[in-house]
Amino acid sequence: MKKVMFISGAGLSAESGIRTFRDHDGLWEQYDVMRVCSVQGWEDDRELVTRFYNARRKDLADKKPNAAHYAIAELERKFPGQIWNLTQNVDDLLEKAGCRDVVHLHGTLTDLRCEECGHVFDIGYAEQNGHDACPMCESALVRHNVVMFGEAAPEYRRIYEALADTDLFVAIGTSGQVIDIASLAKEYEYSVLINPKREEHVTSFGSFEKYIDEYFEHFIQKNATAAAEEMLGLVGRHLG
């Protein structure tokens, strides 16, 4: 049975109004990343980091899925058991679109995590107010459930599980600066990249090698929503 691995990034949700970090007018222009999204920043000022994630959670509450989210959900429904849906996004728009089995590689914004027992629990779009306690062990040491710079991302193991189980790779809305999608594409005979602009692939030595799209068999140079129908056709024909 043919299967596909999706890895999506910030570009998937940008057209739903969720601000990206690296683009022009992105969050990094407003915040010092190391103060709000790193282990050191968390240790230095837990209150500041908590306010940052409270604001991200509040902003997410009214956001709606776009055509690309719905396209992935449609493929899940049409081809059950054939889709690995991995996302770098911490929002819940894939779930809002109807996806049932989403792997959040960098965590989930609508959850908190207990620092004592590791239990993850849902708080929706509410603020973490300092009075939250773990429903499992009752510890007051709880934090956002988003992976920070300087700590491990345990769900990355799912990438390699999917790699061994799929024959089509689709990368959508990701620059390849966090997860090396170019190297992943090399492992597939057929792969699809969806991104509105060409991104440089920089080697581990810091030198430009070639554009990331050159590693993919098919490059759809469009925004995620504009590419949704074409993606449906490509993936549907492969899996069908």
Image: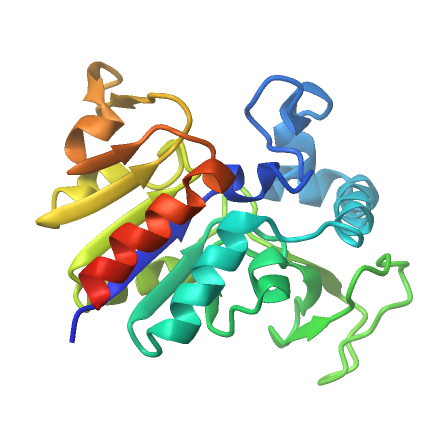
Relative image position of residue 49 (x, y in whole percent): 75, 43
Residue 203 seen anywhere in this rendered image of the structure? yes
Choose between 134 and 200: the one closer to the eye: 200
- Identify the residue at image location x=71%, y=65%: 112
Q: Is residue 168 left or right of residue 71?
A: left
Whether 237 is drawn above or below 207: the answer is below
Relative image position of residue 173 (x, y in whole percent): 44, 38
Whether 153 is drawn above or below 17: the answer is below
> In the rendered image, which quarter contains the C terminus?
bottom left
- Identify the residue at image location x=35%, y=28%: 221
- The single residue placed furthest to the top in the displayed view is 207
Choose between 5 and 207: the one closer to the eye: 5
- The single residue placed furthest to the left in the displayed view is 189
> In the rendered image, which quarter contains the N terminus?
bottom left
- Identify the residue at image location x=81%, y=44%: 55
Relative image position of residue 7 (x, y in whole percent): 37, 51
Q: Is residue 64 left or right of residue 78?
A: right
- Identify the residue at image location x=23%, y=14%: 208
Whether 95 is drawn above or below 36: the answer is below
**Which of the 4 image quarters holds residue 45?**
top right
Q: Total of numbered circles in the picture?
A: 0
Relative image position of residue 217 (x, y in whole percent): 15, 38
**Which of the 4 image quarters holds residue 20?**
top right
Residue 184 seen anywhere in this rendered image of the structure? no
Choose between 204 and 217: the one closer to the eye: 217
* Figure coloring: rainbow
Whether 223 is drawn above or below 73: the answer is above
- The single residue placed furthest to the bottom in the displayed view is 136
